[in-house]
């Protein structure tokens, strides 16, 4: 295995080591890190799971996952064999202290072999019902004690609502110090999401305009074409607000709206982000109908294929009232953003996969061009495109060629793949690398998770109490329920998220 001598010895323990996340994301990301020389020489993966299995059986299965999901394509046999030697399987019941004692003994044995102390990373890749259990046992077995060398990683859902999130955070805090807890939101590992900070704070150009004086409104869209895939059982108890808005969209909102950080210290950045959520204007229960829209897809055509409705998907109740689309209007009550609306929307089975943030600038204070010159005039707009086309587009006005003064909208575009040679790593690679280096910048802190739940609780409660009478209310392959437009102030529009993507594809084809 190609290794990095600057990294300290690490044991990477995966609870749920035989599960889907390990197979599809974690081990491919670790393998890719090994290909980039980003793992220490003294490195081990201990996969813990209930099933009876063996090192070899697990390695074969994980090899298959790597072949399918590695960024480098099918794994080179020699490279895989080198890497696979570091994988061990340990059967065990997550609710038995004995499992943790055996784990402790195995970590100690590895440390003895290596002749040095190692970092121990405990990754909970289990169903959420185990999130409250594993930390307790780790605590009891004495495996959480060492603040510098032991870390725990947890994935969303961090709770089901504010109360359960607080309870889960309390369980984590009973065994681990907050500095040892890494709560993953994989959106924070995306290059383009991290680039929001670079764009805003490494350039003096936009920050002076980044406020209520120049910005009219902001939209954040995370649209997916997929339905619930094989996750109907989980999703039908979650819905779009819990699955996407509480975490991914809130992270995007925080990055767009936060104040400049003073340093690149993890807590400094996280403080600035949590300030945004604290400044968000609470949504009163009786204002929920004006502030939030929910939807559920029925059958429809997507990319010329007939798609079933949500209620026909596997694992979904035939009379399900779970929302597969959610849109929200928010305000941030502070000097920078007072009265600037932030509109958020996300949904499944929408016409196109796209995640983007659109910053709509205000009109010029005085229109000095003759009326006929500015018939097609539009205020400037900046689009930060997270995926699938990674880039930034600035739309502004230019003079159309010819003897007359006529204004037209044009775009200035930046594409990652054109400007940089380097491929973007998968979000998990970035995040696992950060956990190994003890860098918590891209992870959610307890107070941020709770502040996000707090903001959404009135919407969750009102939606739960009042059954939607019109579900399904959008057809698969459309942009969500019609009343989503009604959230916007008159004259505002959801941007057409096709522009950046189509333009990018055309360019790609020609080049
Ligand atoms: C997950 C959600 O967190 O994010 C899924 O649980 C969703 O429902 C996924 O499909 C979207 O992630 P990405 O990276 O494909 O935008």
Image: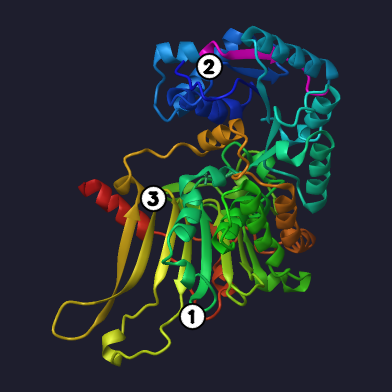
Give the spatial CA distance, label 1 vs label 2.
59 Å
The crowding category of the residue bearing disc 2, from other C-alpha atoms within 10 Å (few below 14, some 14 to 19, many at least 20), is many
Query: On the image, numbered disc 1 is attached to which residue?
Result: 491
- Horizontally, residue 385 falls left or right of residue 59, namely left
Residue 276, placed above or below residue 447: below
The span shown in magenta is 84-95
Q: Where residue 186 sits: x, y (%)?
A: 57, 42
Does the residue tagged 1 have its C-beta within 8 Å of any atom of ligand 1? no
| Callout in the foreground (3, 2) | 2
- Name the secondary structure under disc 3: loop
Residue 210: give its label.
Answer: none
- Name the secondary structure under disc 1: loop
Out of 186 and 273, give the one closest to the viewer: 273
Residue 448, placed above or below residue 189: below
Q: Residue at x 49, y 59 (%)?
A: 201
Out of 279 and 299, give the one closest to the viewer: 279
Query: On the image, numbered disc 3 is attached to which residue?
Result: 389
Which of marks 1 and 3 precedes in the sequence?
3
């Amino acid at each position: 295995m190609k290794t990095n001598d600057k990294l300290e010895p690490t044991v990477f323990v995966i609870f749920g080591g035989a599960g889907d996340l390990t197979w599809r994301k974690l081990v491919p990301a670790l393998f890719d890190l090994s290909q980039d020389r980003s793992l220490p020489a003294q490195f081990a993966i201990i996969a813990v799971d209930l099933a009876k299995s063996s090192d070899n059986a697990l390695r074969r299965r994980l090899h298959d996952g790597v072949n399918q999901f590695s960024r480098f394509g099918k794994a080179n046999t020699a490279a895989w064999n080198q890497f696979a030697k570091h994988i061990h399987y340990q059967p065990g019941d997550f609710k038995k202290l004995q499992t943790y004692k055996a784990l402790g003994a195995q970590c100690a044995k590895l440390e003895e072999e290596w002749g040095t102390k190692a970092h121990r990373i405990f990754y909970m890749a289990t169903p959420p019902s185990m999130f409250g259990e594993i930390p307790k046992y780790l605590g009891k077995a004495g495996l959480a004690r060492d603040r510098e060398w032991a870390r725990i990683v947890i994935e969303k859902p961090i709770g089901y609502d504010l109360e359960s999130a607080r309870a889960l955070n309390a369980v984590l805090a009973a065994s681990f110090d907050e500095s040892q807890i890494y709560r993953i939101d994989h959106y924070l590992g995306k290059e383009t999401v991290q680039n929001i900070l670079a764009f805003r704070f490494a350039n003096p150009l936009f920050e002076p305009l980044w406020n209520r004086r120049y910005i009219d409104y902001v939209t954040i869209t995370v649209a997916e074409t997929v339905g619930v895939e094989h996750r109907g059982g989980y999703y039908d108890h979650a819905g779009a607000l819990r699955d996407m808005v509480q975490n991914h969209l809130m992270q995007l909102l925080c990055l767009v709206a936060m104040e400049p950080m003073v340093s690149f210290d993890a807590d400094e950045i996280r403080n600035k982000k949590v300030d945004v959520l604290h400044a968000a204007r609470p949504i009163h229960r009786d204002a929920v109908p004006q502030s939030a829209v929910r939807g559920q897809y029925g059958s429809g055509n997507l990319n010329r294929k007939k798609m079933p409705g949500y209620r026909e998907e596997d694992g979904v109740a035939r009379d399900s009232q779970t929302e597969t689309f959610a849109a929200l209007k928010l305000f941030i009550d502070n000097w920078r953003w007072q009265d600037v609306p932030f509109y958020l929307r996300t949904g499944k089975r929408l016409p196109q996969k796209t995640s983007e943030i659109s910053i709509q600038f205000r009109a010029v204070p005085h229109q000095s061009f003759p009326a006929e010159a500015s018939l097609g005039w539009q205020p400037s707009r900046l689009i930060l495109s997270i995926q699938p086309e990674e880039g930034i587009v600035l739309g502004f006005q230019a003079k159309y060629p010819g003897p007359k003064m006529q204004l037209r909208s044009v775009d200035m575009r930046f594409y990652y793949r054109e400007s940089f040679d380097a491929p973007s790593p998968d979000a998990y690679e970035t995040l696992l690398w950060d956990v190994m280096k003890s860098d918590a910048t891209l992870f959610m802190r307890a107070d941020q998770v709770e502040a996000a739940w707090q903001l959404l609780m009135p919407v969750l409660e009102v939606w739960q109490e009042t059954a939607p009478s019109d579900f399904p209310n959008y057809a698969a392959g459309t942009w969500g329920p019609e009343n989503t437009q009604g959230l916007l102030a008159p004259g505002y529009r959801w941007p057409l998220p096709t522009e950046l993507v189509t333009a990018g594809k055309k360019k790609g084809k020609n080049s």
